[in-house]
Amino acid sequence: MTPTSNPGSSNVVAIVYSELIDEGATPVAWYPPGEAISYMDLTNISLKSISLLMGDKTDKARLNDPRFIVDQGNAFAIIPFPDQDTVAIAYMFNYTNADHKNVICTLTTTVNAKLRNFLFEKHESIEQMLKFTAFELLKIVMRVKQFKKESLVSLLQALHGKLNRLANG
């Protein structure tokens, strides 16, 4: 079910799944894989997405309190990354891991800066795609103790193809 997508001729630059862990905002899986985007840029996307979407709603001390649930009802943001000449739409969600810790996650899609209007015009469709992909990611992350990163990348690749088709009209 993974569509073929050629990241080299794409309007969608990258898709990054990130988690806020003890070490901070961390890219867990991304598409395209390899060196198409630097790890520093991936970390920057993770950090900015999680930081902006969390805002002042939470503090780190409360993140691991099992009684605390982040209220992110449809937490989406459009975020510029001028140093990468991209703009992104990010979706924040969370889950409780096996240690009963709340894990904050983001799914961030970056596109060429010239497609900024595309994100605004098609945000409802994009948001639905991000929500669906987040749900599928969580099914893997929560149900499989030792999940393979390739399983997550496969979902991100499928999203990449769908978003490119939407962008190309």
Image: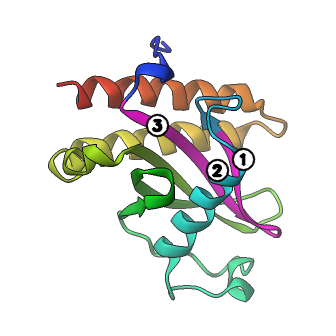
Q: Quadrant of residue 152?
A: top right
Where is residue 146 drawn, in percent x and y?
Answer: 84, 36
Q: Describe the element under mark 3 as helix, strand or loop.
A: strand
The 10 Å Cα crowd at callout 1, few under 14, some 14 to 19, many 20 or more, is: few
**Are the residues tagged 2 and 1 within 8 Å (C-beta)?**
yes
**Residue at the spot of label 2:** 42
The 10 Å Cα crowd at callout 3, few under 14, some 14 to 19, many 20 or more, is: many
Residue 70 seen in this snapshot: no
| The magenta stretch spans residue 18 | yes
Where is residue 138 drawn, in percent x and y?
Answer: 60, 44
Q: Residue at x 62, y 32 (%)?
A: 36
Q: Specify the amino acid type for callout 1.
A: Tyr
Is residue 169 found left or right of 100 in the rendered image?
left
**Residue at the spot of label 3:** 13
Q: Which mark is residue 163?
A: none
**Residue at the spot of label 1:** 39
Q: Specify the amino acid type for callout 2.
A: Leu
Separation of marks 2 and 1 at Cα, in angstroms: 5 Å
